[in-house]
Amino acid sequence: MLRSRRSVLSAIAAGLVVGSLALPTSASALTLGFAQVGAESEWRTANTVSIKEAAKAAGITLKFSDAQQKQENQIKAIRSYIAQKVDVIAFAPVVTTGWDTVLMEAKKAKIPVILTDRSIETKDPSLYVTMIGSDFTEEGQKAAKWLLDNYKTPGDVNIVELQGTVGSAPAIERKKGFEEGIKGEPRFKITRSQTGDFTRAKGKEVMEAFLKTDKNIQVLFAHNDDMAIGAIQAIEAAGMKPGKDIIIVSIDAVKGAFEAMMAGKLNVTVECNPQLGPQLMTVVKEVKAGKEQPKWVKTVEGVFPMETAAKEFPNRKY
Ligand code: GZL
């Protein structure tokens, strides 16, 4: 189930109250088991820092695991949290499918589950209390809108796309939003699209392959800044100027993207805020206190074009 507005609203209407549990008297008694995706990008590293710092500040005991972007490792970690009888389980699902069995085990153990960052497809929305994270479709639409508003060179616009992790909500939804955004402009075409798995190394490798087969590329759309930064290295190695010969549109707004924009090598980055830690800890406490939660706690985000980079950079926290 990718979050559609209607399903979010119907789930809110259904409302979900965590079962009545013996409530700890203070947050210090609370233990949160968190199964992180990995450490694949600057975004993920900042997300992990936010969660660890917020748990400490909230007096919540944090059990943390890094799945190296493998679903089986996240499932193992969730099972170990169930065995340890933590108060709440939270995780950022690496892909959208394959979670119902382990989440049913958590439900049977009466341990509430909170999704952060990425959503899942499930036949049973009661398997998780809420999802705290961005609207990835909107991020893809924002990327496309910036391109249509700012790309003025006449003629065909061949776009190559570096997709995020195959099967992940951000990859599926950013692609969908971007394609919706360029639909009305037939000269803008995605000519090639391949996953770079959200990493710099893979982004560079795939961009090298794109350039090797056909250099007639006007735009690169990268689902995250790390792949864009890897691609910038490949574009320069091919003797072309990133940000000029090839316009680069990316997502996340991590520090590396601002540095690339200040160097004139990246044209715009759409913000995807990784600092979900404080919101997560608030929701953990509210869930344990039996407070009803909306099915989706949406993060607020902006768009940062190259021209604003130098001014904005000192304010960036990740
Ligand atoms: C988005 C997050 C994505 C980032 C990538 O919320 O899931 O995963 O865009 C990260 O940088 O690897």
Image: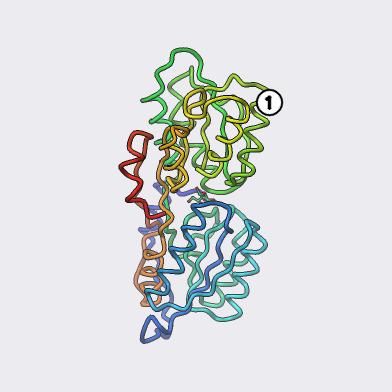
Front-most of 187 and 312?
Answer: 312
Q: Is 258 displayed left or right of 38 in the figure?
A: left
Q: Which residue position is annotated with label 1?
A: 212
> Considering only vertical position in the picture, is 101 above or below 270?
below
Q: Position of residue 256 (x, y in %)?
A: 47, 45
Q: Is 38 displayed left or right of 185 in the figure?
A: right
> Considering only vertical position in the picture, is 284 above or below 116?
below
Q: Position of residue 222 (x, y in %)?
A: 53, 37
Q: Position of residue 227 (x, y in %)?
A: 56, 41
Front-most of 1 and 23?
Answer: 23
Front-most of 99 and 55?
Answer: 55
* Residue under the point 39% across and 36% down: 142
Q: Is mark 1 within 8 Å of ligand 1?
A: no
How many numbered tags mark residues here?
1
Front-most of 261 and 30?
Answer: 261
* Residue under the point 42% across and 28% down: 147
Q: Residues within 10 Å of mark 1 (few under 14, many from 20)?
A: few
Q: Position of residue 13 (x, y in %)?
A: 35, 58
Report the coloring of the rendering.
rainbow
> Considering only vertical position in the picture, is 222 above or below 37?
above
Instruction: For mark 1, give the secondary structure.
Output: helix
* Residue under the point 38% across and 80% down: 27
Circle 1: residue type: Lys
- The quarter of the picture where residue 130 lies is bottom left
